[in-house]
Image: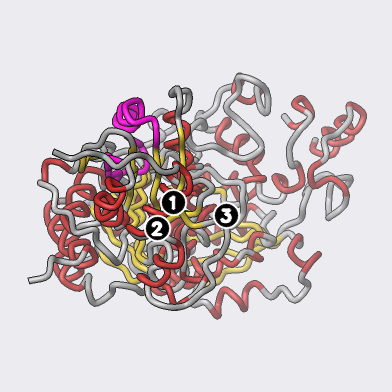
Amino acid sequence: MSPKSIRQQFADTLLAVGQEDPNLVVLVGDISHFLLQPYAKACPGRYYNVGICEPTIVSMAAGLARTGFHPVVHTIAPFIVDRSFEQIKLDFCYQQLAGNLITVGSAFDYSNLGITHHCYDDFALIKALPGTEIVYPSTALEFDALFRQTYNDRALTLHRVPGTSHEVEFAGGDIQVGRGIRVAEGRNLTIVATGPQLRSALDARPGLLAAGWDAEVLYIHTIRPLDTALIRASVEKTRNVLVVEEHMTSGGLGDDVLRTVTGIPGLQYASLSIPDRFVTEYGTYEEQCERLGLTSGGIERKVREHFGARPPVKTA
Amino acid sequence: MVHDSNDGHIPSAYSIVDILEVLYRAVLKFDARNPEWPERDYFILSKGHGCVALYTVLHRHGFLTDEDIKLFCRSGGILGEHPDRTKVPGAEASTGSLGHGFPFSVGIALGHRLRGMHNRVFVLVGDGECHEGTIWEAANVANNLQLGNLCVVVDWNGSAAQLMPRDDLPAKWRAFGWNVTEIDGHSTPAIEAAFRGLQMQPEGQPNVIIAHTLKGKGVPMLEGHGPWHHRTPTDEEMQVIMEALR
């Protein structure tokens, strides 16, 4: 049996939390409407498929927060983050109101729909706003855990929901907002991976070992607040760090990692991300990843080009 | 206030101050000693640059002190050229960028209806603000949600027609399903009658009062669309203003 999709878990979690907490209100911009019908039926009056008017949906959600509700705004990522950025900034953040933005269409997930439906600037934009959190749950379990930990806190939380899972199953208790996870130990290279790219990082380890790189893999599901202690401790040991993310290079996780590790003697840093350009090609999500090097092979290439070759690591 | 701090929008405040005076004296339920009183009505100044009028009325009704007014736009003060709700007691929303306060109010109105409460929500928008797309998004949404606890007041002072003269606001609001009342926004009896005549229930047709107003009303030197939108008076001009207001 294939694991539950993150999107299905989103619907299931809202249903469960909505039944427990009468302050949860969900506003959608005509997406996931059928998926959310169990929630709509179980929580009457607290579900609105408002219309195709995303900035107004965000402002309305802030107004609901002003009256004590925990609002969820849900639609395709660029329509929330890019189109409604000023509403997020002024109606939530400036007014110190809390809520949740749950996006689908992570990065180039809607690969054939083109630039209008891509969103790989969301970390940069939301990080620029005071009072925000960013989580990037990439399994069903992570969505459930991170939503429950953040939906009613004092921050405006962006939940970036990808269409693809890394399929690494952590124990429920391992997923703590703001805490990264050391998934594999290594000696001379730290790979900081986020989202589905955790899979690429893990798959790259054998090839890297043969090239002399014993990679420690850190998984980051919370972009903000970032687990700087975990990252710094790892890089102090390895002195070499590669960040892998489905986000533009500018303003991504890589920038924060670089700030975190600055000053470590002998530090070498590289970023495997979306170059600062639009991804105008078509094809599947996997083909886009292949073109951008966001694969295990791409990681091996990047390490080779950036950090060079070393004697093969002897394994016991 | 504006003269002393050398900053502020006088004409935009004079076009709405008669409406705010009636709202706070005769319409809104509030408790200045407890601005977050759960039973209160809400007033949101969506055209935040008219805030000098709001501050004056909040001061009259005990939300603000003489010291607050003295420190308008000064270091250490809480009153800026747009209201910041995290600082100003009685300001229900932080506004300034146009087209935000109204959709924000739609959420407040919906939230109170969800809680089964009967608070009323009043929001004042400018006619120039009605150029913003979010005004019409929110008008559409509020009508479809039948937010009868929501009343918009449009300050129709003619700013919008400077840029887009095809400006039939009553027809537009009617087309969006709102119950439209048109008044002289400087006639106290007309303003009082318009608010008295409102049927506001949690569920029902939303109301809009379209108020014909004049920027700078009351001081001939300031009236209309001249250079005074964001200009502060000299000492001599201040005397002219005060004499006109006497």
Dot 3 surroundings within 10 Å: few (below 14), some, or many (20 or more)? many
Image coordinates of residue B52 in percent, x first then y, are 66, 38
Q: Is residue B23 left or right of residue B4?
A: left
Report in which chain the residue with disc 3 lies: B
The disc placed on residue B124 is 3
| Magenta segment includes A126 | no
Report in which chain the residue with disc 1 lies: A
Q: Which residue is mark 2?
A: A298
Image coordinates of residue B231 in percent, x first then y, are 83, 40
Most foreground residue, A314 or B208: A314
Q: From the image, state whether disc 3 or disc 2 is nearer to you.
A: 2
Most foreground residue, A30 or B107: A30
Q: Which residue is mark 1?
A: A302
Q: From the image, state whether disc 3 or disc 1 is nearer to you.
A: 1
| Magenta segment includes A237 | yes
Residue at image coords 37%, 71%: A285
Image coordinates of residue B59 in percent, x first then y, are 57, 30
Quarter of the image with the C terminus of chain B is top right
Q: What is the distance, in whole Å, between disc 3 and disc 2 at their CAs?
A: 56 Å
